[in-house]
Amino acid sequence: MKLKQNLFYLNVGILIILVCVLLTNYDSMEGITNMNCCGGIQLGVHYQETDKSPPEYIRRCFKSSREDGSVVYDWNSFPCTTEDGGQCCPDVPDSECIPTTGGGYCKSDGGNKIYRRGESTHSPYIRRGGDTTLDITNSIDMEDYFYDRSGGGGQAVSPEMQSFLDRRDRNSQYIQSHLVEASRNRVQRMTRLRTQAESERKTQQIKNTIVFIHLLFVIGFAIVIKDLIIQDIADFYTMLGVRYSEFTGKAVSP
């Protein structure tokens, strides 16, 4: 009988350890990597970390000012200006930056807004015919940004304008060279995450099964030696009563 008692307590201890391990290893599934950059852009795909201005299709989501004849945007290229950061659609509550062919806008239930070039206060956004929403992860939507002006148009432009056009060309070419690769990497990452989630689900099911079977074993074993358990509980409370009596001075001396 003493051996049965010891086995019962041992199995209770094992059950507790299994439950603790189960809870400790119950990790949530890793989500899709997303920098949550303002406008949904990605470093290395839609812009380079050395860029000083946001991509053309989201520029109206940021404040800007004119310094020494050029426009300076309140935007960070590395790692990125986040969607919920103070620089993305500032002063427009509960808003998100929507990329468009005209420069983007801040979508909000309180009214859509834009920041015009060189201005730090927002203005109401009025959609015009040529301003369409862009899916910046879709190569078809972005194909208008993939072009090269190296052939020239025969018309002289100012050094500032040429610098702007050159920079825009570099960004467009950078997007073109990375967009397909980014899409492929995204598909591979999704596949890897689905496989990992399936593996973790199966592992969790095995753990749950082991714990359940062991729990049934402990319950069944407890039923078999229930008389010993009841006796141990009675002895424990009897011992507590004796100790309490000794503590309060009510114990009867032999």
Image (cartoon, rainbow, N blue to C red):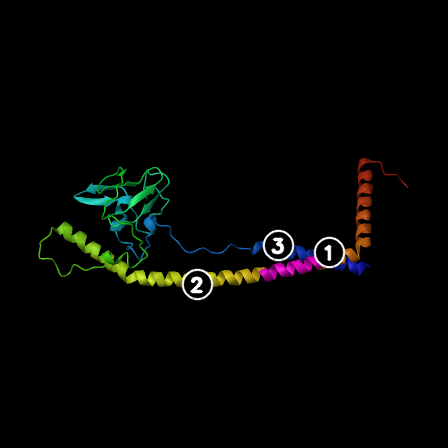
Quadrant housing the N terminus: bottom right
Residue 143 position within the rendered picture, expressed as x and y whole percent measured from the top left: 25, 58
Relative to 111, 31 lies left or right: right
Q: Which residues are magenta?
A: 205-216
The amino acid marked with disc number 2 is Thr
Q: Secondary structure at mark 2?
A: helix
Residue 244 position within the rendered picture, expressed as x and y whole percent measured from the top left: 80, 39
Residue 171, by quadrant, is: bottom left
Q: Secondary structure at mark 3?
A: helix
User: Which one is nearer the viewer's eye here, 7 or 107?
Assistant: 107
Q: Earlier in the sequence, mark 3 or mark 1?
A: 3
- Per the image, the residue denoted by label 3 is 20
Residue found 67% across the figure and 60% down from its top: 213
Instruction: Tell me the crowding category of disc 2: few under 14, some 14 to 19, or many 20 or more residues within 10 angstroms, Cα based.
Output: few
The amino acid marked with disc number 1 is Ile
The circle drawn on residue 219 is: 1
Check contact, mark 1 vs mark 2: CB within 8 A. Answer: no
- Per the image, the residue denoted by label 2 is 191
- State the CA–CA distance, disc 3 to disc 1: 18 Å
Quadrant housing the C terminus: top right
Could one spot residue 80 in this view of the protein?
Answer: no
- State the CA–CA distance, disc 1 to disc 2: 42 Å
Residue 8 position within the rendered picture, expressed as x and y whole percent measured from the top left: 75, 57
Relative to 94, 168 lies left or right: left
Vertical side of 232 occupied by 112: above or below: above
Q: Could you tell me what secondary structure mostly forms the magenta stretch?
A: helix
